[in-house]
Image (tube, rainbow, N blue to C red):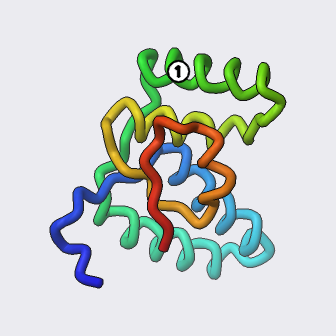
């Protein structure tokens, strides 16, 4: 599928998770870690990185409280990512459709 026309944005939280994964997996070798982080930066430059703002924190708190009341909580980072997608009126592209479906107003798509 040609996705060139899609708005390509990524949450700063997703960036953290991606970079953390590289640091965790490759910290045993400083040279390899440097190469992996440079590759990650080259991949991430294709995206607009969406910041975590007060408005998003407020929306995330609302989502978190609602999910907790329903006994259907998800991870804090995923709540922030969902709040960002809602704030910017974006479709969240994820492999965790069942996970994010707990937020009915969130538009999702899998890959």
Residue drawn where x is 67% and y is 25% of the image? 64
Residue 40 vertical position relative to residue 109 in the rendered view, above or below: below
Residue at 44 percent of width and 36 percent of height: 84
| Quarter residue 80 falls in | top right
In the image shown, does 30 or 92 lie closer to the viewer?
92
Residue 14, image x and y in percent? 54, 52
Find residue 91 and report its horizontal and vertical position in percent.
37, 51
Image quadrant assignment for residue 1: bottom left
Determine the residue positioned at 47% across, 44% down: 12
Q: Where does residue 71 sit, x and y in percent of width and height?
A: 83, 30
Residue under numbered circle 1: 57
Q: In the structure shown, which secondary structural element does the residue marked by tag 1 occupy?
A: helix
Image height of 1 relative to 104, above or below: below
Q: Going 63% across and 73% down the picture, which residue do you hit?
A: 33
The x and y percentages for residue 25 are 75, 72
Above or below 22: residue 2: below
């Amino acid at each position: 599928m040609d996705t060139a026309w899609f708005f390509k944005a990524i949450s700063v939280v997703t960036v953290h998770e991606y970079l953390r994964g590289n640091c965790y997996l490759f910290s045993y070798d400083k040279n390899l870690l440097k190469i992996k982080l440079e590759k990650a930066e080259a991949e991430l430059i294709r995206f607009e990185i969406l910041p975590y703002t007060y408005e998003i924190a407020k929306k995330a708190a609302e989502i978190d409280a609602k999910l907790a009341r329903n006994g259907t909580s998800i991870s804090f980072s995923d709540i922030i990512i969902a709040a960002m997608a809602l704030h910017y009126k974006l479709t969240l592209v994820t492999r965790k459709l069942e996970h994010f479906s707990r937020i009915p107003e969130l538009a999702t798509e899998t890959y």
